[in-house]
Amino acid sequence: MALVTYNSWLAWRLNGDPRALCGYLSELAAQDQPYQWLFRLGDLLAAAVFAVIAVLGRRGWGRWIGPRAAQVSAALLVVAAGTVVDALFNLPCAESRDAVCAATDSLVRRVHEASSTVVSVSMLVLIGLAALGWWEQERWTARVRATAGFAVGVGVLLLLSAVAPTLAPGMQGPAQIVQVLACSAWIGLLAWRLEDEADGRQVRDG
């Protein structure tokens, strides 16, 4: 469910503009875009799913991640809350295709940018916390190295999407797409491990 709702950008063709994926994905939900309500709804549904996963994961990831499970859960709740703010305070325009609007400052844009930053940083933090939890239990195993490398990769994508509008206009969209897909896969893993932990409890109880 989270994989679908968090990737509503796949319906970008509804936008009707072939340049829709050149800018930030949140531009699809900008106030001046057709079907902006669809992309905003996708974000709200994704946030709800994230929150459910986070609440269940507080205990469900204990055997998997260890004592850091509660912190991973808290970070995912922050991601969920930030995603809600993103959807409610959507951009006034598709900035990459409207220079005049992009140059016009507004409180809504500031709030949206701040919440987007919180979401991105919190996503990176929750991956790092999982890696830290495993490192505390098993030190530099293959799983810890892979997760740490994944966190670095996500961080690089965040940096690329942040500097792209200045250094390589039009590349922020592709960079963010890879980032969102990667983060979606990570949250999908978190959700899958909930089922795994639940199955383990059923076996023990039986």
Image (cartoon, rainbow, N blue to C red):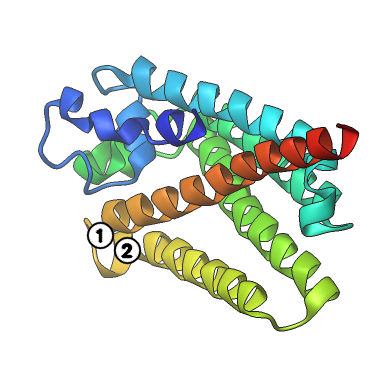
The label shown at residue 164 is: 2
Asked if 68 appears above or below 73 in the picture, the reply is below
Give the x, y percent position of residue 164: 32, 63
Q: Are marks 2 and 1 in contact (CB under 8 Å)?
A: yes
Asked if 41 appears above or below 63 in the picture, the reply is above
Asked if 93 appears above or below 146 in the picture, the reply is above
Along the line of sight, the residue nearer the viewer: 17 or 5: 5
Residue at left 83%, top 53%? Answer: 63
Mark 2 element type: helix
Please, what is the three-letter code of the amino acid marked with disc 1? Met
Along the line of sight, the residue nearer the viewer: 60 or 113: 60
The label shown at residue 55 is: none
Query: What is the distance, in whole Å, between disc 2 and disc 1 at their CAs?
Result: 6 Å
Which residue was labeled with disc 1?
A: 171
Give the x, y percent position of residue 10: 27, 34
Residue at left 26%, top 23%? Answer: 33
Q: Residues within 10 Å of mark 2 (few under 14, many from 20)?
A: some
Q: Check the picture and name the quadrant holding the C terminus.
A: top right
Whether residue 70 is visible, yes or no, is yes
Residue found farthest to the bottom: 140
Whether residue 89 is visible, yes or no, is no
Along the line of sight, the residue nearer the viewer: 7 or 36: 7
